[in-house]
Image (cartoon, rainbow, N blue to C red):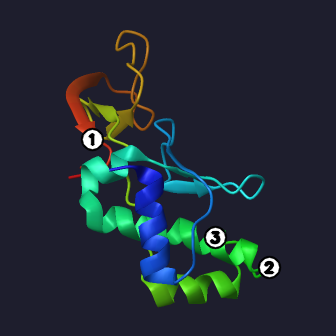
């Protein structure tokens, strides 16, 4: 399905107002579900939200961005902190925050003396670095996703 046509449908169904600009997939978005650009009116969306969470959550993200869009063109408060934005978002059932799509792996290191756990994106040189708490030797335990804390 064409993304712009989908956003136009959501706009008419949920807001009763037309979406007159373009909607684009943006693979570079990391921590957000979408963005509104007041300068030219287009919307960017993160395709990983749709892949990871499905159409129901994606539609709520589209509603969020359309709140920015319609309030901006109605010359009302369109930013997150504005009451107009909060009220319209609640009315149409949009998401306030996008779900986390960052699936980056973290390396887990454990101190052999005190058991302190360290999570790092980068690999640690075990010959050079020691535990910051007790000075003990570190041991590599494996990798995990950020959200999977024990």
Tell me which numbered mark, 1 or 3, is placed earlier along the sequence: 3
Give the Cα separation between the discs numbered 1 and 3: 32 Å
The residue tagged with tag 2: helix, strand or loop? loop
Identify residue for label 1.
Answer: 145
Mark in front: 1 vs 2:
2
Give the number of the disc on residue 68: 3
Tell me which residue sits at (64%, 74%) in the image.
Answer: 70
Tell me which numbered mark, 3 or 2, is placed earlier along the sequence: 3
The residue tagged with tag 1: helix, strand or loop? strand
Tell me which residue sits at (38%, 19%) in the image.
Answer: 123
Front residue of 63 and 1: 1
Q: Position of residue 67 (x, y in %)?
A: 58, 74
Q: Position of residue 142 (x, y in %)?
A: 20, 28
Image quadrant assignment for residue 53 = bottom left
Q: Position of residue 9 (x, y in %)?
A: 42, 69
Q: Position of residue 100 (x, y in %)?
A: 38, 54
Front residue of 2 and 43: 2
Above or below, comparing residue 83 to residue 59 in the picture? below
Tell me which residue sits at (68%, 87%) in the image.
Answer: 83
Give the Cα separation between the discs numbered 3 and 2: 11 Å
Could you classify mark 1 by the number of other residues whose Cα lies within 10 Å: few (under 14), some (14-19), or many (20 or more)? few
Front residue of 13 and 91: 13
Identify residue for label 2.
Answer: 75
The residue tagged with tag 3: helix, strand or loop? helix
Q: Residue furthest top?
A: 127
Give the number of the disc on residue 6: none
Determine if residue 64 is in view.
yes
Residue 109 shown left or right of residue 78 in the figure: left
């Amino acid at each position: 399905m064409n993304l712009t046509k989908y956003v136009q449908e959501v706009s008419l169904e949920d807001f009763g107002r037309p979406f007159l600009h373009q909607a684009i997939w943006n693979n570079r978005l990391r921590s957000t579900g979408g963005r509104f650009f007041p300068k030219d009116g287009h919307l960017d969306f993160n395709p990983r939200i749709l892949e990871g969470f499905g159409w129901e959550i994606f539609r709520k993200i589209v509603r969020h961005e359309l709140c920015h869009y319609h309030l901006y063109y109605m010359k009302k408060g369109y930013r997150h902190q504005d009451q107009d934005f909060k009220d319209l978002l609640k009315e149409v059932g949009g998401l306030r925050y996008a779900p986390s799509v960052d699936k980056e792996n973290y390396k887990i290191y454990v101190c052999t003396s005190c058991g302190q756990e360290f999570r790092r994106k980068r690999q640690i040189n075990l010959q050079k670095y020691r535990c910051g708490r007790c000075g003990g030797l570190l041991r590599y335990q494996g990798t995990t996703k950020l959200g999977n804390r024990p």
